[in-house]
């Protein structure tokens, strides 16, 4: 199968390496002006070792592909979609691996409902240089809407062979919220505090904020449809490697805009819609907003 990956960060790099290693045709779609200096192979390093695989490179999606993976930041989605030049019918499946929920409706309005296959990935992945990626100790999990099972069954099997835990889910909203109820509180607390997950959990004050944000996210999700038990989600947070830092935290530290609307927005808007108080999420979001707009001192 032919795969195009729009977004050359940690998630896109991992998917690209896994599929290219399985013998699939992989094209990395890069930002304008970066192709010349981007390597013709991807290099991945994890606890097992390091290896490289060859890939194609392009600045636009100008050919037909069986799968288009969208792995850009939510803040970059609109700009990235301008590089998709082919007609929707020239793409077999479009698989967004973005944080948040709201992007699914936007993509379906543009490409059609059945072509867009919602998915969520939990991974500790980082781009350390163009074409070079580091994968952390946290197990990688990929959940994909059952809508894409007939088109993506063989692809998910290849990803399983690479070591990624994959499954198809019939409930799309539960699939998306299952990531957000964990990611939202962890991203907000680590970014607001500049602490690792382990430091958050060891601090009485910050753990109180983390647990409060988890309970709010679970309450909003349950009111919206898919129910989650906050105690179970807190237990999952406790199993995250203690040295982990969120991608939002890394973005803010690097001076890049955080995915605040994609990550905190659905919880805050859902709380208003259903009459649920979300004071922890609101406080943390405001702390992140202030931190991301305050110039750092060199």
Image: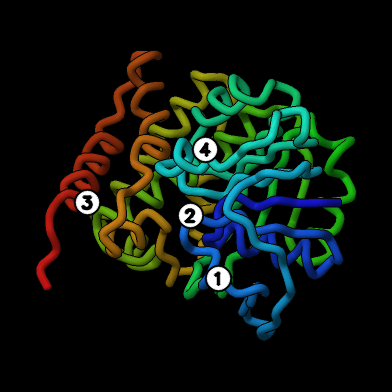
Q: In the rendered view of the protein, which quadrant contains the C terminus?
A: bottom left
Q: Nearer the viewer, residue 120 or 63?
A: 63
Residue bearing the label numbered 4: 82
Query: In front of the other: label 2 or label 3?
Result: 2
Q: Give the mark, 4 or 2, whose residue is nearer the N terminus.
A: 2
Residue bearing the label numbered 2: 32
* Image side of residue 210 versus residue 172, left or right: left
Query: In front of the other: label 3 or label 4?
Result: 4
How was this image coloured?
rainbow
Q: Secondary structure at mark 4?
A: loop
Q: Give the mark, 1 or 4, whose residue is nearer the N terminus.
A: 1
Q: Nearer the viewer, residue 2 or 293?
A: 2
Q: Is residue 29 visible?
A: yes
Residue 38 is labelled as 1
Name the residue: 75% across, 36% down.
91
Name the residue: 69% across, 21% down.
113
* Image side of residue 151 versus residue 72, left or right: right
Residue extending farthest to the bottom is: 49
Residue bearing the label numbered 3: 292
């Amino acid at each position: 199968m032919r795969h195009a990956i729009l977004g050359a960060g940690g998630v896109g790099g991992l998917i690209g390496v896994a599929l290219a290693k399985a013998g699939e045709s992989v094209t990395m779609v890069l930002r304008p002006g970066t192709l010349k200096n981007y390597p013709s192979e991807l290099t991945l390093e994890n606890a097992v070792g390091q290896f490289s695989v060859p890939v194609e490179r392009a600045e636009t999606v100008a050919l037909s592909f069986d799968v288009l993976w969208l792995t850009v930041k939510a803040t970059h989605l609109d700009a990235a979609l301008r590089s998709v030049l082919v007609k929707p019918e020239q793409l077999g499946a479009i698989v967004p691996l973005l944080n948040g929920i709201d992007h699914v409706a936007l993509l379906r309005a543009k490409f059609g409902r059945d072509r867009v296959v919602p998915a969520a990935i939990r991974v500790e992945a980082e781009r350390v240089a163009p074409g070079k990626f580091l994968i952390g100790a946290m197990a990688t999990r990929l959940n994909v809407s059952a809508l894409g099972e007939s088109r993506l069954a063989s692809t998910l099997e290849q990803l399983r062979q690479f070591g990624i835990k994959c499954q198809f889910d019939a409930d799309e909203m539960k699939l998306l919220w299952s990531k957000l109820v964990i990611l939202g509180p962890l991203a907000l607390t680590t970014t607001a505090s500049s602490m690792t997950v382990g430091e958050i959990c060891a601090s009485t004050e910050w753990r109180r904020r983390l647990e409060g944000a988890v309970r709010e996210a679970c309450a909003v999700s349950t009111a919206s449809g898919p129910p989650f038990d906050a105690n179970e989600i807190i237990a999952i947070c406790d199993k995250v490697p203690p040295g982990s830092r969120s991608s939002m935290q890394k973005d803010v530290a690097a001076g890049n805009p955080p995915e605040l609307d994609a990550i905190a927005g659905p919880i805050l808007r859902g709380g208003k819609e259903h009459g649920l108080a979300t004071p922890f999420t609101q406080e943390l979001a405001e702390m992140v907003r202030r931190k991301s707009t305050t110039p750092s001192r060199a």
